[in-house]
Image (cartoon, rainbow, N blue to C red):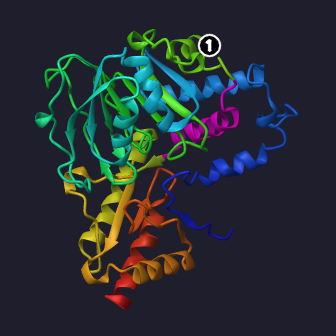
Amino acid sequence: MTQRPFNFSAGPAALPEEVLNQVAAEMLDWQGSGMSVMEMSHRGPEFTRICAEAENDLRELLQVPANFRILFMQGGGLAENAIVPMNLARGGKVDVVVTGSWSKKSAEEARRYASVNIAASGSDSKFTQLPSPGSWQLSADAAYVHVCSNETIDGIEFHELPDLKALGSAAPLVIDCSSHQLSRSIDWSRVGLAFGGAQKNIGPAGLTLVFVREDLLGHALPICPSAFDYQTVAAAQSMYNTPPTFSIYVAGLVFQWLKKFSYAGKTGVAAIEQRNIDKAQLLYGALDGSKLFENRVAAHARSRMNIPFYLRGEYNTPQLTSAFLDGAKARNLLQLKGHKSVGGMRASIYNAMPLEGVQALVAYLKDFEAQYG
């Protein structure tokens, strides 16, 4: 079989080939039902089974405590920027730590439903640092504290979630973990609510995952649509309205794939986290050792998932950047163009990206530098 191209898209992103093959095989007839998953009633026994298995596997993979509800919702991370304050802010004040483009959007959206305190921000406008939690200016009366634990555009990641209790805050921590959920474990003792779009590490666009502690249910503002009220969605087992059935089905197959995944003597999330560490170290090492390319994020804040990089100094021209991207495509290294707001290049190396894909990119970096450096 011909090697598929390596897809470095930031999302919707690459899926495991094994999962795509199973989706193709079951497209017209899911396990003898005579129906595609896309044709099933979301309340029928076939899809009810698919959804329950997906939720159980996800809870097992991330070791989600029993006092958290897992909700399958729609709207992506952008919608959750509104849905979270409508459910948790109670019309009061929220703290937001702005560390990149996505947390900045979260703060802007939350202002529609609450008073927002910017508790901390990146040390510069280009977001290359993480402010130390000890420097955060937290409110005494915040309904919650919001962080984006991985900034997809800026390539910044919290490798340890803040301990709000140690910082003197009794507020629950809300994390937007869209672009690194299931790439590592989560310390649930520090989290009140986590959310993320599925289209990075988990499945197709259309599904949004919400993990919410049960004591945070039941506080939605009167203006909150019933379909976005976490308590209503939880009571209906994510079936209050028609959920994104096909996306849940594919996500469930990804969960099954990850449960079986092994690497470096480990299995499951521990195994994928180790491979993600190895992939990131390989690519950052190549960038740090290059005279032509650079990554501008401080070492302590570098994302394992999204690695933006640029040509250095006088080499950083539109012409040479285009030459790099054209050459990458010719080598079947796809979707390496940086986000339009920051330019340059970006390699998103989510769970489905094999180590061989990063090795191929590193080899191309070296060949390009030998030609143009």
Front residue of 181 and 171: 171
Q: Position of residue 339 (x, y in %)?
A: 43, 60
Residue type highlighted by circle 1: Ala
Please name the residue shown 36% across and 32% down the image.
Answer: 175
Please name the residue shown 18% across and 20% down the image.
Answer: 169
Please name the residue shown 31% across and 29% down the image.
Answer: 187
Q: Position of residue 263 (x, y in %)?
A: 43, 50
Q: Is 93 left or right of 346, judged from the image as shown?
A: left
Q: Position of residue 290 (x, y in %)?
A: 27, 77
User: Residue tagged by mark 1?
Assistant: 236
SS of the residue under disc 1 = loop
Characterize the local packing of mark 1: few (<14), some (14-19) or many (20 or more) Cα atoms within 10 angstroms.
few
User: Measured along the vertical axis of the image, is residue 289 above or below residue 263?
Assistant: below
Outermost residue toward the right in this view: 34
Q: Main secondary structure of the magenta part?
A: helix
Q: Is 125 left or right of 328, judged from the image as shown?
A: left
Q: Is 265 left or right of 139, judged from the image as shown?
A: right
Magenta span of residues: 242-261
> Would you say residue 64 is visible in this rendering?
no
